[in-house]
C-alpha cells in the first residue's frame, strides 16, 4: 500500500469511530429516556423525547437564511427566529421533567434519568453538527 492510501484509510477509520461513538451515546440517551418512563410506570417523561426530535428542525429549516459571507454585517431575523425556537425547545426539554417532578407527577429518579438522557441526546446532536460541518473554502 502506498503512503497516501494508508492516510486515507486512517481517516475513514477515525470517521467511523466517531460515528459509532456518537450513535452509542445517542442510543444510551434514548434508552435512559424510555427507561425513565417504563421503570416507574408513568409515561409523561416521554414528552421530552418529542422535544429531542423537534429541537434541530428550526435550525435546519431557518439556517439557510444565514449569510455565508463572514464580512457581511447583516443579521437575518428569520435565522434568529429559528435559533429562538430551537432554544425554546431545548429549555423545555430540560424544564419539563423538573416541572413534572415538582408537581409530583413523576418521581425524582425518573426526572434524573430523563434529564441525563436529554443531556446525552442534545450533546450528541451538538457534537455531530460540529464534527461533520462542511468547511467553507475562502
Image: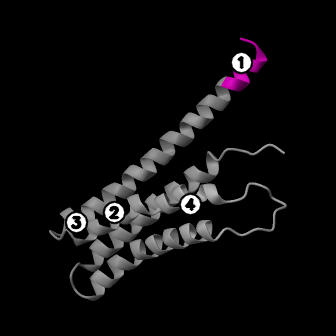
- Residue at numbered disc 1: 5
Read off the magenta span. Answer: 1-8
Secondary element under disc 3, as helix, strand or loop, is: helix
Secondary element under disc 4, as helix, strand or loop, is: helix
Residue 30 picture quarter: bottom left
CA distance separating discs 2 and 3: 14 Å
> Going 47% across and 58% down the picture, which residue do you hit?
57
**The N terminus, quarter of image:** top right
In-image side of 118 versus 32 (left or right): right
CA distance separating discs 4 and 2: 20 Å
> Going 63% across and 48% down the picture, which residue do you hit?
131
Percent coordinates x, y for residue 42 in the rendering = 17, 71
CA distance separating discs 2 and 1: 43 Å
Q: Between disc 4 and disc 2, whose residue precedes? A: 2
- Residue at numbered disc 2: 50
* Number of other residues with Cα within 10 Å of mark 1, as a class: few under 14, some 14 to 19, many 20 or more: few
CA distance separating discs 1 and 3: 48 Å
State if disc 3 and disc 4 touch (CB < 8 Å): no
Secondary element under disc 2, as helix, strand or loop, is: helix
Percent coordinates x, y for residue 75 in the rendering = 71, 70
CA distance separating discs 4 and 1: 39 Å
- Residue at numbered disc 3: 37
CA distance separating discs 4 and 3: 33 Å
Q: Between disc 2 and disc 1, whose residue precedes? A: 1
- Residue at numbered disc 4: 62
Q: Is residue 2 magenta?
A: yes
Amino acid at each position: 500500500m502506498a503512503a497516501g492510501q494508508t492516510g486515507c484509510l486512517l481517516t475513514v477509520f477515525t470517521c467511523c469511530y466517531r460515528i459509532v461513538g456518537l450513535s452509542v451515546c445517542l442510543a444510551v440517551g434514548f434508552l435512559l429516556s424510555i427507561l425513565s418512563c417504563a421503570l416507574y410506570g408513568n409515561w409523561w417523561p416521554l414528552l421530552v423525547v418529542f422535544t429531542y426530535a423537534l429541537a434541530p428542525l428550526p435550525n435546519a429549516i431557518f439556517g439557510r437564511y444565514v449569510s455565508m459571507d463572514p464580512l457581511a454585517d447583516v443579521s437575518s431575523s428569520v435565522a434568529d427566529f429559528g435559533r429562538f425556537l430551537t432554544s425554546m425547545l431545548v429549555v423545555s426539554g430540560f424544564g419539563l421533567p423538573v416541572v413534572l417532578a415538582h408537581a409530583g407527577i413523576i418521581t425524582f429518579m425518573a426526572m434524573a434519568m430523563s434529564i441525563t438522557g436529554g443531556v446525552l441526546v442534545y450533546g450528541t446532536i451538538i457534537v455531530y453538527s460540529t464534527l461533520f460541518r462542511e468547511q467553507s473554502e475562502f
